[in-house]
Image (spheres, grey):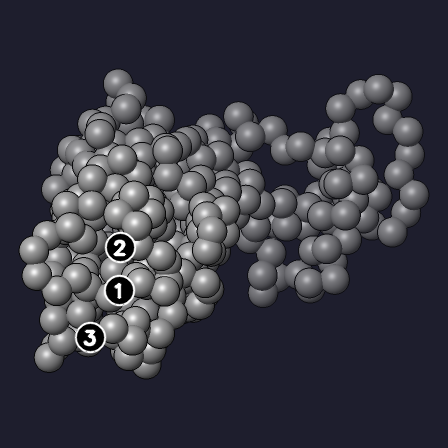
Amino acid sequence: MQTPEPLGGTRPTSRDVARTAGVSQATVSLVLGDKWRGRVSERTAEAVREAARTLGYRPNLAARNLRLGRTRTALLVVPALTNEFFAHVYTGAAAAAARHGFGVVLYPSPDGLGPARDPFASAQAALDGVIASSMATDALEAFRGSDLPLVMLDSDPADPGAAAHVNLDVADGMRRVTEHLLELGHRRFLHLASAAPSWTFDVRAATLAHALRGAEVRTVRSPLNVADAWETARLALAAPGPRPTAVICDDDILAVGVCKAARRLGLRVPEDLSVTGFDDMALATVVEPELTTVRLPAEEFGRRGMEALLAVLAGDPPPPYTLPVTLAARGSSGPVPAS
């Protein structure tokens, strides 16, 4: 690669990048427009990218967008901005988008449930596509009737209204939790389920019911916040009859509420009561004991979602994809109490 020449304070052009990389302007256009595969070598593409970085070159996106008829903007719709999981989803999506000259606008649906209203006066003119993460079943009607491609994350793969689906293997995550607790000897369970009407929580409930068939299971529902989870768990744990020895929660936030309720009732975790969560947020390792939970690759999830949308926009819709999850076994789960 040639040494870049001083540009005298002027903004570097594609011609400058081509001269620095020792290639033609057409090659620069192919590489920076992400259309180089099968046309130039990986080595040449990297030389062009390195020249652009060295020179501080930024393509004229306004002119390019006029030619393409696109805004190079995607909308990421999430149930809430207060949940750490969706912050990581956004981080992954935005990083993938930036590599292709796209931006991502983050938009929460009202009250975390929906329906999500069109956030712009004319969404079709302002956006190239929509990515929706973990949304309630009927929360996206405003977008389904538009010409915008819709990529669904953590949603029913049989939904015909989406151009692409990317999911987390939440069923396997719940199976891992139940197997872990059964191996510890637990047979009386409380399922603290999310009150949000969402496919992902329906899958968790169905998987849990199947995995624990023959065991004693009681299900109660709570909104996704610590205060409601605490009160719901307190009432369930103090109810007449044999107390559950393990509480399986749909989310780490719910699990923290359970741990708080257990302490107020004089129960030790995990000696008297095992508690498990789902998501593996930072919260899971802040509490003591640390939460046994299902680790979800949130950033990769967002990245895959954005890549799926880019593929749809390029006319090559990807097949449904499911990301694996793992169990993080920590101090909040232990053997069933001897008594």
Q: Is residue 3 left or right of residue 101?
A: right
- Residue at disc 3, secondary structure: loop
Residue marked by disc 2 = 250
Spatial separation of the CA atoms under disc 1 and disc 2 = 13 Å
Residue 178 in picture, x, y percent from top left: 27, 72
Residue marked by disc 1 = 246
Residue marked by disc 3 = 187
Q: Nearer the viewer, mark 3 or mark 2?
A: 3
- Mark 1 surroundings within 10 Å by alpha-carbon count, few (fewer than 14), some (14 through 19), many (20 or more): many
Spatial separation of the CA atoms under disc 1 and disc 3 = 8 Å
Residue at 18% x, 70% y is: 188
Residue at 35% x, 57% y is: 268
Q: Is residue 220 left or right of residue 301?
A: left
Residue 94 in picture, x, y percent from top left: 50, 41
Work out whether mark 1 precedes mark 3 in sequence or the reverse, and give the earlier one.
3
- Residue at disc 2, secondary structure: loop
202 or 94: nearer the eye?
A: 202
288 or 285: nearer the eye?
A: 288
Contact check, label 1 and label 2, Cβ < 8 Å: no
Inspect this view and state whether residue 227 appears. yes
Query: Relative to 100, does residue 293 appear above or below in the rendering?
Result: below
- Residue at disc 1, secondary structure: strand
Q: Which mark is residue 75?
A: none
Disc 2 residue type (three-letter): Asp
Spatial separation of the CA atoms under disc 3 and disc 2 = 19 Å
Disc 3 residue type (three-letter): Arg
